[in-house]
Amino acid sequence: MIERFSEPPGQGAGYTVTMRGLVLMCSIGIRRREREQKQRVRFSVDLVATRAAAFPGDDRRRVINYEKVVAAIREIARSGHIDLCEGFAERVCTVCLADPRVERVRVWVEKLDVFSDAEGVGAMLERTRPADKLG
């Protein structure tokens, strides 16, 4: 189950961009079979805007671009083998936090074909931009 970010009490409205359920063939895992054969991996991302970017309205320059997030995930997947879902998620978090409009990011990376009786297994990482780096 994917749980959304929630604002602390009294913090007011925010702006979150989401990308759900991108499925790619990836070389990921520590087992020999996983190193030799790509497998289906599902990605989901929540990006919470900084206060300065919280109300983009119709100004496209202020909007967090989910196309760039999808492109970055595809590029990471093409870059070669990654041992752990956590390592893949960390790379995605780093790319997302490179956008100065992003304050927090949550990334899910799930291998879909590991267990026949489970929808997926993997990891979720959450990272927050340090307070001294907020825009």
Image (cartoon, rainbow, N blue to C red):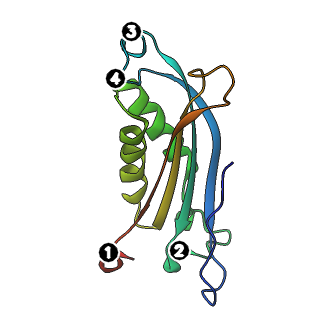
The residue at 59%/20% (across/down) is 113
Distance from Cα at disc 1 to Cα at disc 3? 41 Å
Q: Nearer the viewer, mark 4 or mark 2?
A: 4
Q: CA distance from mark 4 to mark 1?
A: 31 Å
User: Tag 2's secondary structure?
Assistant: helix
Circle 2 or circle 3, nearest the eye: 3
- Location of mark 4 (residue): 81
Q: Is the residue 4 above or below the residue 93 in the image?
A: below
Disc on the earlier residue, 1 or 3:
3
Amino acid identity at mark 3: Glu
Which residue is denoted by mark 2 in the rendering?
Answer: 53
Q: Quadrant of the C terminus?
A: bottom left
- Label 4 close to label 1 by CB (< 8 Å): no
Farthest bottom residue? 10
Which amino acid type corresponds to the residue marked 4 in the rendered image?
Answer: His
- Which residue is identified by label 3? 36
For the residues bearing labels 4 and 2, Cβ distance under 8 angstroms = no
Q: Sequence order check: which comes first, mark 2 or mark 1?
A: 2
Residue, disc 1? 133
Q: Secondary structure at mark 4?
A: loop
Give left or right: position of 33 versus 69. left
Could you tell me residue 49's position as x and y percent?
Answer: 53, 69
The mark that comes first in sequence, 4 or 2, is: 2
Q: Report how far apart the C-alphas of labels 4 and 2 lie in the structure.
A: 35 Å
